[in-house]
Image: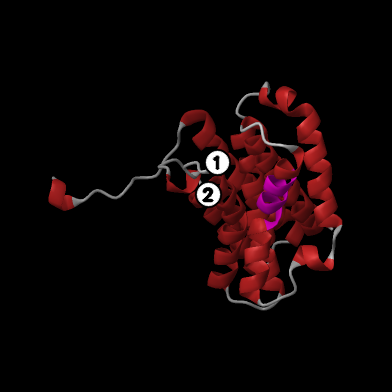
């Protein structure tokens, strides 16, 4: 049940980010709905295609209804959402924390290896945002120095490791999602980064 809720949460908050981007560009409602839906289901779609399992939103159209509800909400409340301060980045952070766990859990549920499970967690958590930013013609956070992919990696890796150690799935999911959210939140609030590559030839 918790993983199902994380899946819905991941879709919803990523859909919010897509809707916010569309509202900032003053697009019409259909375009906003498209942005929200593609962003919301993009990461999970890539995950399911790579795992060779039925695509989640094709089997359960509730996910599409979630995107529709989110789109209507953003269309009506976009101005108020923007007043909250950095709504796009924080919604993205929540999406990363939820989807990094859900992606890893789904890979483990179909019997994939540890490394594949972690990779699926990272892909699920980041691909929707990449699609959103690419379509919008904006620079993706994935190519910026701040912690982004690393937060998804930490969330997925923590969940897999805790699961292998026999930690109850609910507790493992909560701890792992919290780790990812703290790391991404630190990047948003305090500019946390990891050391970047330096070309020795330029020194």
Magenta stretch, residue numbers: 33-41
Looking at the image, is 44 positioned above or below residue 48? Answer: above
Residue 113 position within the rendered picture, expressed as x and y whole percent measured from the top left: 58, 76
Q: CA distance from mark 1 to mark 2?
A: 21 Å
Q: Quadrant of the C terminus?
A: top left
Asked whether residue 192 is drawn in magenta, I would say: no
- Left of 42 or right of it: where is 145? left
Residue 187 position within the rendered picture, expressed as x and y whole percent measured from the top left: 50, 36
The answer to which of 30 and 163 lies nearer the viewer is 30
Are the two marked residues, 1 and 2, in contact with CB atoms closer than 8 angstroms?
no
The part of the image, by quadrant, that contains residue 118 is bottom right
Asked whether residue 36 is drawn in magenta, I would say: yes
- Which circle marks residue 134 in the picture? 2
Q: Is residue 146 visible?
A: yes
Q: Quadrant of the N terminus?
A: bottom right
- Tag 1 residue: 184
Colouring used for the render: secondary structure
Magenta highlight: main SS: helix
Looking at the image, is 13 positioned above or below residue 80? Answer: below
The part of the image, by quadrant, that contains residue 21 is top right
The part of the image, by quadrant, that contains residue 112 is bottom right
Residue 201 position within the rendered picture, expressed as x and y whole percent measured from the top left: 14, 52
């Amino acid at each position: 049940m918790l993983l199902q809720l994380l899946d819905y949460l991941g879709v919803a908050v990523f859909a919010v980010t897509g809707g916010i981007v569309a509202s900032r560009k003053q697009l019409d409602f259909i375009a906003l709905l498209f942005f929200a839906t593609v962003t919301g289901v993009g990461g999970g779609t890539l995950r399911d295609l790579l795992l060779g399992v039925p695509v989640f939103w094709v089997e359960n159209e509730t996910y599409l209804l979630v995107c529709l509800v989110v789109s209507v909400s953003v269309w009506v409340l976009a101005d108020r959402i923007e007043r909250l301060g950095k709504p796009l980045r924080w919604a993205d952070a929540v999406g990363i924390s939820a989807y990094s766990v859900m992606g890893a859990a789904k890979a483990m549920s179909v019997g994939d290896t540890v490394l594949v499970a972690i990779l699926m967690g990272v892909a699920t958590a980041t691909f929707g945002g990449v699609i959103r930013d690419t379509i919008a013609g904006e620079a993706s956070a994935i190519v910026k120095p701040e912690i982004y992919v690393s937060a998804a990696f930490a969330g997925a890796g923590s969940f897999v490791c805790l699961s292998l150690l026999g930690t109850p799935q609910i507790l493992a999911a909560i701890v792992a999602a919290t780790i990812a959210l703290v790391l991404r939140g630190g990047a948003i609030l305090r500019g946390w980064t990891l050391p970047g590559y330096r070309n020795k030839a330029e020194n």
